[in-house]
Image: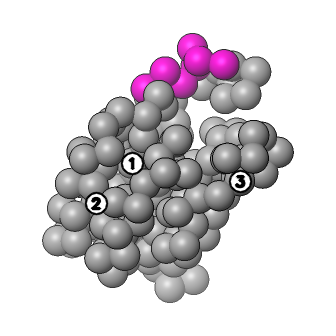
Amino acid sequence: MTQTILLLNGPNLNLLGQRQPEIYGSATLADVEEMCRALLPEGMALDARQSNHEGALVDWIQEARSGMAGIIINPGAYSHTSVAILDALNAYDGPVIEVHISNIHKREPFRHHSYVSRRADAVIAGLGTEGYAAATRRLVGMLSGS
């Protein structure tokens, strides 16, 4: 049976590779998704989704309760504002890894706090898009018991 990892990206991440490349790099969201898929062993799949809308992210997290083995999430700006995303994640029983491309702790003070971090089993920040690869490797390890 295939285990599926849900990769969620929040607002403005559809603009990766175009928006502020000095902060977010030149890789596109499609590049990130391809990189993560390439790291999955046989028997694991990736369901990658992006939305600029908080409600869509909440809906997908709720759907993950029935069938997703784990979640990797970059909530974008919703990290700092969304109790709704935190509440949805708190209702999910599997592992959750939070990813930030930039080091949010070196940026504006309002970015230093993440609601999602209160639920995440791990937080990766400041590794650029390579943070997604680190999250994928860690989640695969968590799901395979290593």
Looking at the picture, the colour scheme in use is one colour
Q: Residue 77, how many percent across, how many down?
A: 52, 41
Please tell me how crowded label 1 is: few (under 14), some (14-19), or many (20+) other residues with Cα within 10 Å: many
Q: Residue at x 78, y 51 (%)?
A: 105
Judge whether 96 appears above or below 110 on screen: below
Magenta stretch?
14-20
* Mark 2 burial class by Cα count in 10 Å: few <14, some 14-19, many 20+: many
Which of labels 3 and 1 is toward the front? Answer: 3
Quadrant location of the N terminus in the rendered image: bottom left
* Vertical comparison of 91 with 102: above or below: below
Residue where numbered disc 2 is placed = 61
Judge whether 51 appears above or below 65 on screen. above
- Label 2–label 1 contact, CB within 8 A: yes
Gap in angstroms between the C-alphas marked 3 and 1 = 20 Å
Q: Residue 29's spot in the image, x, y percent?
A: 47, 30
In percent of width and height, residue 115 lies at 52, 63
Q: Main secondary structure of the magenta part?
A: loop
Q: Which residue is mark 1?
A: 8
